[in-house]
Amino acid sequence: MRNRAFYLTICLIFGLINLSACGQKGPLYMPKEPEQNKQPVKPETQSEQKGN
């Protein structure tokens, strides 16, 4: 009986530590990726490349 009480106490302490370990308040979520430039990049034409 004593071993069972010790085991139950250890499990309870371990469970409480795991539940309180997060520290972040509110629901967990994955952050959104930052938006890239909304304007598409204009491809260079051959005439623009010859000017270099």
Image (spheres, rainbow, N blue to C red):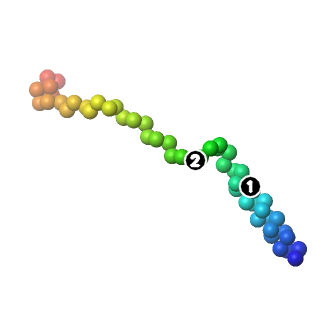
SS assignment at label 1 = helix
Residue at left offset 46%, top offset 41%: 32
| Image position of 34 with respect to 27: above or below | above
Q: Identify the residue at the far bottom of this view.
A: 1
- Residue closer to the observer: 28 or 49: 28
Q: Position of residue 3 (x, y in %)?
A: 85, 74
Q: Identify the residue at the far front of this view.
A: 26
Query: Which amino acid type is shown beneath numbered disc 2?
Result: Leu
Q: Judge from the rendering whether residue 52 lies leftward or rightward of residue 17; answer left or right.
A: left
Q: State the quadrant of the C terminus.
A: top left
Q: In terms of sequence position, does the residue under pointer 2 or pointer 1 come before the other?
A: 1
Q: Which mark is residue 17?
A: 1
Q: Position of residue 15 (x, y in %)?
A: 73, 60
| Image position of 32 with respect to 46: above or below | below
Q: Quadrant of residue 23?
A: top right
The residue that label 2 is drawn on is: 28
- Residue closer to the observer: 36 or 52: 36
Residue at left offset 85%, top offset 70%: 5
Residue at left offset 62%, top offset 44%: 26
Classify mark 2: residues with Cα within 10 Å, few (<14), some (14-19) or many (20+). Answer: few
Q: Judge from the rendering whether residue 48 lies leftward or rightward of residue 38; answer left or right.
A: left
Q: Judge from the rendering whether residue 41 lies leftward or rightward of residue 20; answer left or right.
A: left
Q: State the quadrant of the N terminus.
A: bottom right
What is the spatial separation of the Cα atoms under label 2 and label 1, in whole angstroms?
Answer: 18 Å
Query: Which amino acid type is shown beneath numbered disc 1?
Result: Ile
Q: Identify the residue at the far right of this view.
A: 2
